[in-house]
Image (spheres, grey):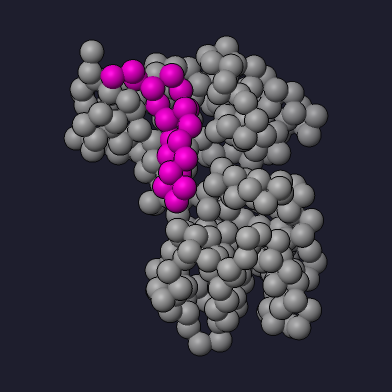
Amino acid sequence: MVLTDAEIVASLTASARAVPYPGEWLEPPFDGERQALVARDAGLSELRVDRESGRVFGIELASGAAQTIAPSPAALAVLGDAYADAVARSAGASEHELRVIEGALLAAVRVVAAELAEPESFWSIAAEELGDGITADGPPIPTTIVAAPADGPTVVVALPMLGLRQALAAEGLTLSGYAELLPSVSLNGGLAATLAGTAAPGAFRGGPAQVLVLPAGAGASEAELAFPSLRLVVAFGGTDASAADVPAGVEFVVIDDPAPFAALAELVAARRASGWFHSRSPEATS
Protein backbone atom coordinates (compact mmCIF):
# COMPACT_ATOMS: atom_id res chain seq x y z
CA MET A 1 0.00 0.00 0.00
CA VAL A 2 1.37 3.39 -1.03
CA LEU A 3 0.84 6.23 1.43
CA THR A 4 -0.93 9.25 -0.03
CA ASP A 5 -0.26 12.85 0.93
CA ALA A 6 -3.53 12.90 2.86
CA GLU A 7 -2.54 9.84 4.89
CA ILE A 8 0.92 11.20 5.57
CA VAL A 9 -0.22 14.64 6.72
CA ALA A 10 -2.87 13.05 8.94
CA SER A 11 -0.18 10.94 10.60
CA LEU A 12 2.14 13.89 11.22
CA THR A 13 0.34 14.90 14.39
CA ALA A 14 1.50 17.48 16.92
CA SER A 15 3.22 14.63 18.75
CA ALA A 16 5.13 13.61 15.61
CA ARG A 17 6.19 17.21 15.04
CA ALA A 18 7.50 17.43 18.60
CA VAL A 19 10.65 15.53 17.60
CA PRO A 20 13.79 17.71 17.87
CA TYR A 21 14.15 18.49 14.18
CA PRO A 22 15.18 22.16 13.64
CA GLY A 23 13.68 22.56 10.17
CA GLU A 24 10.31 23.65 8.84
CA TRP A 25 7.46 21.18 8.48
CA LEU A 26 5.97 21.34 5.00
CA GLU A 27 2.39 21.03 3.81
CA PRO A 28 1.03 18.89 0.96
CA PRO A 29 1.40 18.34 -1.88
CA PHE A 30 4.69 16.74 -0.81
CA ASP A 31 7.54 16.49 -3.30
CA GLY A 32 8.64 12.95 -4.07
CA GLU A 33 6.80 10.12 -5.76
CA ARG A 34 8.40 7.40 -3.63
CA GLN A 35 9.73 9.44 -0.72
CA ALA A 36 7.58 12.32 0.48
CA LEU A 37 9.54 15.40 1.56
CA VAL A 38 7.81 16.46 4.79
CA ALA A 39 10.34 18.82 6.43
CA ARG A 40 13.38 20.83 5.39
CA ASP A 41 16.11 22.67 7.27
CA ALA A 42 17.26 25.56 5.08
CA GLY A 43 18.82 23.32 2.44
CA LEU A 44 20.94 21.56 5.06
CA SER A 45 18.85 18.49 5.74
CA GLU A 46 15.49 16.93 4.95
CA LEU A 47 12.98 14.60 6.55
CA ARG A 48 11.25 12.18 4.21
CA VAL A 49 8.62 9.47 4.51
CA ASP A 50 8.96 6.35 2.37
CA ARG A 51 5.53 6.00 0.81
CA GLU A 52 5.70 2.19 0.71
CA SER A 53 7.26 1.28 4.07
CA GLY A 54 6.28 4.38 6.04
CA ARG A 55 9.86 4.75 7.29
CA VAL A 56 10.73 8.29 8.37
CA PHE A 57 14.34 9.18 7.66
CA GLY A 58 16.62 12.19 7.62
CA ILE A 59 19.13 13.15 4.93
CA GLU A 60 22.15 15.42 5.35
CA LEU A 61 22.21 17.18 1.98
CA ALA A 62 25.92 18.01 1.95
CA SER A 63 27.01 14.39 2.35
CA GLY A 64 23.92 12.51 1.22
CA ALA A 65 24.04 10.48 4.44
CA ALA A 66 20.66 9.13 5.51
CA GLN A 67 19.47 7.59 8.75
CA THR A 68 16.16 6.33 10.08
CA ILE A 69 14.38 8.62 12.53
CA ALA A 70 11.36 6.37 13.05
CA PRO A 71 10.08 3.15 11.45
CA SER A 72 6.71 4.80 10.74
CA PRO A 73 4.83 8.08 11.25
CA ALA A 74 2.95 6.46 14.15
CA ALA A 75 6.26 5.56 15.78
CA LEU A 76 7.44 9.12 15.14
CA ALA A 77 4.50 10.35 17.23
CA VAL A 78 5.45 7.97 20.05
CA LEU A 79 9.01 9.26 19.95
CA GLY A 80 7.82 12.85 19.83
CA ASP A 81 5.72 12.27 22.95
CA ALA A 82 8.71 10.70 24.71
CA TYR A 83 10.90 13.67 23.79
CA ALA A 84 8.28 16.23 24.85
CA ASP A 85 7.87 14.44 28.19
CA ALA A 86 11.64 14.43 28.70
CA VAL A 87 11.84 18.15 27.91
CA ALA A 88 9.04 18.91 30.38
CA ARG A 89 10.81 16.95 33.12
CA SER A 90 14.13 18.68 32.38
CA ALA A 91 12.87 22.11 33.45
CA GLY A 92 14.81 23.07 36.56
CA ALA A 93 16.48 19.66 36.74
CA SER A 94 19.91 19.24 38.30
CA GLU A 95 22.87 17.95 36.31
CA HIS A 96 22.36 14.47 37.74
CA GLU A 97 18.62 14.57 37.04
CA LEU A 98 19.29 15.61 33.44
CA ARG A 99 21.49 12.55 32.93
CA VAL A 100 18.74 10.35 34.36
CA ILE A 101 16.26 11.94 31.94
CA GLU A 102 18.74 11.38 29.09
CA GLY A 103 18.92 7.69 29.94
CA ALA A 104 15.15 7.40 30.22
CA LEU A 105 14.67 8.97 26.79
CA LEU A 106 17.13 6.54 25.23
CA ALA A 107 15.30 3.67 26.91
CA ALA A 108 12.02 4.89 25.41
CA VAL A 109 13.67 5.10 21.99
CA ARG A 110 14.95 1.53 22.30
CA VAL A 111 11.42 0.31 22.98
CA VAL A 112 10.45 1.62 19.54
CA ALA A 113 13.57 0.29 17.78
CA ALA A 114 16.91 -0.52 19.39
CA GLU A 115 18.96 0.66 16.41
CA LEU A 116 17.56 4.19 16.76
CA ALA A 117 19.55 4.63 19.99
CA GLU A 118 22.92 3.61 18.58
CA PRO A 119 25.86 6.01 19.18
CA GLU A 120 25.91 9.12 16.95
CA SER A 121 22.34 8.51 15.82
CA PHE A 122 19.71 11.26 15.66
CA TRP A 123 18.15 10.10 18.93
CA SER A 124 21.38 9.47 20.83
CA ILE A 125 22.47 13.01 19.97
CA ALA A 126 19.07 14.44 20.98
CA ALA A 127 19.26 12.59 24.30
CA GLU A 128 22.83 13.75 24.91
CA GLU A 129 21.85 17.36 24.19
CA LEU A 130 18.98 17.01 26.65
CA GLY A 131 21.41 15.68 29.24
CA ASP A 132 23.51 18.78 28.60
CA GLY A 133 20.47 20.99 29.16
CA ILE A 134 19.96 21.85 25.49
CA THR A 135 16.44 21.44 24.09
CA ALA A 136 14.90 21.89 20.66
CA ASP A 137 12.24 24.27 21.96
CA GLY A 138 14.65 26.63 23.68
CA PRO A 139 15.55 30.14 22.47
CA PRO A 140 16.59 30.48 18.81
CA ILE A 141 20.31 30.19 19.41
CA PRO A 142 22.67 27.55 18.02
CA THR A 143 22.32 23.96 19.12
CA THR A 144 25.96 23.32 19.97
CA ILE A 145 26.92 25.69 22.77
CA VAL A 146 30.41 25.41 24.23
CA ALA A 147 31.89 28.07 26.49
CA ALA A 148 34.63 29.87 24.56
CA PRO A 149 38.02 30.71 26.06
CA ALA A 150 38.08 34.05 27.84
CA ASP A 151 39.80 35.74 24.90
CA GLY A 152 38.45 33.53 22.12
CA PRO A 153 36.01 34.47 19.34
CA THR A 154 32.65 32.83 18.77
CA VAL A 155 32.99 30.42 15.84
CA VAL A 156 29.98 29.37 13.73
CA VAL A 157 30.34 26.22 11.62
CA ALA A 158 27.77 26.00 8.80
CA LEU A 159 26.74 22.43 9.61
CA PRO A 160 23.90 21.06 11.73
CA MET A 161 24.84 19.23 14.92
CA LEU A 162 24.85 15.77 13.36
CA GLY A 163 26.84 16.94 10.35
CA LEU A 164 29.44 18.57 12.59
CA ARG A 165 29.78 15.43 14.68
CA GLN A 166 30.24 13.32 11.55
CA ALA A 167 32.79 15.71 10.05
CA LEU A 168 34.82 15.71 13.26
CA ALA A 169 34.59 11.93 13.51
CA ALA A 170 36.13 11.68 10.03
CA GLU A 171 39.24 13.32 11.54
CA GLY A 172 39.15 11.12 14.63
CA LEU A 173 37.76 13.97 16.74
CA THR A 174 34.76 14.34 19.03
CA LEU A 175 32.75 17.43 19.90
CA SER A 176 33.98 17.45 23.48
CA GLY A 177 37.57 16.84 22.43
CA TYR A 178 37.46 19.49 19.71
CA ALA A 179 36.01 22.00 22.18
CA GLU A 180 39.39 22.00 23.91
CA LEU A 181 40.97 23.13 20.63
CA LEU A 182 38.22 25.37 19.28
CA PRO A 183 34.78 25.79 20.86
CA SER A 184 32.22 26.08 18.08
CA VAL A 185 28.55 26.65 17.32
CA SER A 186 26.56 24.47 14.91
CA LEU A 187 23.53 25.49 12.90
CA ASN A 188 19.98 25.61 14.14
CA GLY A 189 17.29 27.12 11.93
CA GLY A 190 19.62 28.20 9.14
CA LEU A 191 22.80 30.24 8.95
CA ALA A 192 21.21 33.69 9.24
CA ALA A 193 19.27 32.69 12.36
CA THR A 194 22.35 31.07 13.88
CA LEU A 195 24.48 34.17 13.34
CA ALA A 196 21.74 36.37 14.77
CA GLY A 197 21.48 34.07 17.79
CA THR A 198 25.12 34.69 18.69
CA ALA A 199 24.34 38.39 19.04
CA ALA A 200 21.76 37.82 21.79
CA PRO A 201 22.96 39.58 24.97
CA GLY A 202 24.93 37.17 27.13
CA ALA A 203 24.48 34.26 24.70
CA PHE A 204 28.21 33.56 24.32
CA ARG A 205 31.32 34.54 26.22
CA GLY A 206 32.97 35.38 22.92
CA GLY A 207 30.12 37.71 21.95
CA PRO A 208 28.62 37.77 18.43
CA ALA A 209 30.20 35.48 15.84
CA GLN A 210 33.59 36.60 14.52
CA VAL A 211 34.47 33.42 12.61
CA LEU A 212 32.29 31.72 9.99
CA VAL A 213 33.33 28.30 8.72
CA LEU A 214 31.98 26.98 5.41
CA PRO A 215 32.68 23.24 5.08
CA ALA A 216 32.61 21.64 1.63
CA GLY A 217 29.14 21.98 0.17
CA ALA A 218 28.12 24.84 2.45
CA GLY A 219 27.54 28.38 1.28
CA ALA A 220 26.59 31.80 2.57
CA SER A 221 24.62 34.67 1.11
CA GLU A 222 26.00 38.17 0.70
CA ALA A 223 23.89 39.31 3.65
CA GLU A 224 25.19 36.47 5.86
CA LEU A 225 28.80 37.26 4.93
CA ALA A 226 28.11 40.88 5.90
CA PHE A 227 27.17 39.94 9.50
CA PRO A 228 28.60 42.97 11.36
CA SER A 229 30.93 41.24 13.82
CA LEU A 230 32.57 38.79 11.38
CA ARG A 231 36.34 39.08 11.08
CA LEU A 232 37.26 35.77 9.43
CA VAL A 233 35.50 33.54 6.89
CA VAL A 234 37.05 30.12 6.33
CA ALA A 235 36.11 27.81 3.44
CA PHE A 236 37.18 24.18 3.31
CA GLY A 237 38.40 22.65 0.06
CA GLY A 238 35.42 21.82 -2.14
CA THR A 239 33.57 25.00 -1.24
CA ASP A 240 32.93 27.39 -4.12
CA ALA A 241 35.41 30.05 -3.02
CA SER A 242 34.36 32.34 -5.87
CA ALA A 243 30.97 32.71 -4.21
CA ALA A 244 32.45 34.14 -1.02
CA ASP A 245 32.23 37.91 -1.51
CA VAL A 246 33.36 39.03 1.93
CA PRO A 247 33.24 42.71 2.91
CA ALA A 248 36.29 44.86 3.50
CA GLY A 249 37.91 44.17 6.85
CA VAL A 250 36.95 40.48 6.79
CA GLU A 251 39.70 37.97 6.00
CA PHE A 252 38.86 35.08 3.68
CA VAL A 253 40.92 31.89 3.94
CA VAL A 254 40.59 28.59 2.07
CA ILE A 255 41.76 25.48 3.94
CA ASP A 256 42.61 22.63 1.59
CA ASP A 257 43.80 20.05 4.08
CA PRO A 258 42.89 16.40 4.73
CA ALA A 259 42.19 17.41 8.35
CA PRO A 260 40.45 20.77 7.91
CA PHE A 261 39.05 21.08 11.43
CA ALA A 262 42.47 20.58 13.00
CA ALA A 263 43.89 23.17 10.60
CA LEU A 264 41.01 25.51 11.45
CA ALA A 265 41.84 25.37 15.16
CA GLU A 266 45.45 26.27 14.40
CA LEU A 267 44.40 29.13 12.12
CA VAL A 268 42.04 30.67 14.68
CA ALA A 269 44.64 30.33 17.43
CA ALA A 270 47.20 32.13 15.25
CA ARG A 271 44.80 34.95 14.39
CA ARG A 272 43.79 35.30 18.04
CA ALA A 273 47.45 35.56 19.05
CA SER A 274 48.00 38.27 16.43
CA GLY A 275 45.14 40.36 17.82
CA TRP A 276 42.96 39.98 14.73
CA PHE A 277 39.70 39.55 16.61
CA HIS A 278 37.67 42.20 18.40
CA SER A 279 37.80 42.30 22.17
CA ARG A 280 34.59 41.28 23.89
CA SER A 281 32.23 44.04 24.88
CA PRO A 282 30.99 43.95 28.50
CA GLU A 283 27.43 43.12 27.43
CA ALA A 284 28.68 40.07 25.51
CA THR A 285 30.04 38.46 28.63
CA SER A 286 27.85 35.86 30.29
Quarter that holds the C terminus = bottom right
Residue at image x 37%, y 43%?
A: 40
Residue range (magenta)? 52-71
Q: Is residue 182 above or below residue 173?
A: below
Q: Is residue 58 magenta?
A: yes
Q: Which residue, as the protein is rendered here, is positioned at the far front? A: 258
Q: Residue at x 69, y 82 (%)?
A: 276
Residue sticking out furthest to the bottom: 248
Q: Position of residue 145 (x, y in %)?
A: 66, 51
Q: Is residue 99 left or right of residue 258?
A: right
Count of numbered labels shown in the rendering: 0
Indicate the position of residue 217 as horizontal and vertical percent values. 45, 58
Q: Is residue 179 left or right of residue 33?
A: right
Name the quarter where the N terminus is drawn: top left
Relative to 138, say whether 219 is above or below: below
Q: On screen, 114 above or below 99?
A: above
Q: Residue at x 78, y 32 (%)?
A: 94
Percent position of residue 9, x then y = 27, 26
Asked whether, in this view, residue 276 is left or right of residue 76, the answer is right
Res 213 quadrant in image: bottom right
> What percent of the width, then of the height, locates residue 30?
23, 35
Residue 280 figure quarter: bottom right
What residue sits 28% from the left and 19% below the top?
Answer: 52
| Residue 227 visible, this orientation | yes
* Residue 161 shows up from this direction: no
> 19 or 280, which is in the foreground?
19
Residue 103 falls within the magenta-colored stretch: no
